[in-house]
Amino acid sequence: MAHFESGVKDYVRTRATVEVYFPVDWRGSADISCSQCFFFRRNYQTCGLNGEVCQYPNKYVGDSCPLEPVEENADDQTDNPA
């Protein structure tokens, strides 16, 4: 167990990769907004990934959203959850 009474000497860098699936209706319209994201904190209106406040979360994705779109191809369709 580490002891930090004298302070912190250094930090160990780590990284996480997450995937979020936004819903698409039968007409092909996607709802890509913070309110559809698994990491959106509804009680605080903030992002669970970066802690930033989400403006208009029912309509848009926040300016500081760390998620990046992934290009889909035929091989990726088998990984899609049902």
Image (cartoon, rainbow, N blue to C red):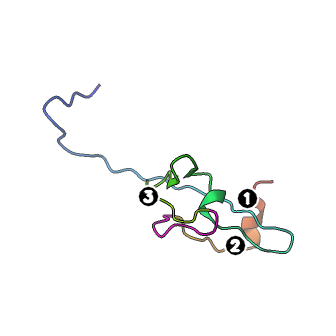
Residue 3 % position (x, y): 22, 27
In the rendered structure, the answer to whether residue 45 lies left or right of residue 9 reads: right
Front tag of 3 and 1? 3
Front tag of 3 and 2? 3
Q: Which numbered marker is on residue 79?
A: 1
Q: Is residue 47 above or below residue 27?
A: above
Marks counted in the figure total: 3
Q: Is residue 51 above or below residue 71?
A: above
| Image: magenta residue range | 58-66
| Residue at 26 percent of width and 46 percent of height | 11
Q: Which residue is mark 3?
A: 52
SS class, disc 3 = loop
In the rendered structure, the answer to whether residue 16 lies left or right of residue 40 reads: left
Q: Is residue 30 above or below residue 7?
A: below
Please say whether residue 30 is visible from this viewpoint: yes
* Residue type (three-letter) at the residue carrying disc 3: Glu
Q: Which numbered marker is on residue 72?
A: 2
Q: Which numbered marker is on residue 68?
A: none
* Residue type (three-letter) at the residue carrying disc 2: Glu
Residue 24 % position (x, y): 77, 67
Residue 56 % position (x, y): 57, 65
Q: Residue furthest left?
A: 6
In the rendered structure, the answer to whether residue 71 lies left or right of residue 13 reads: right
* Local crowd size for mark 2, using a 10 Å CA cut-off: few (<14), some (14–19), many (≥20): few
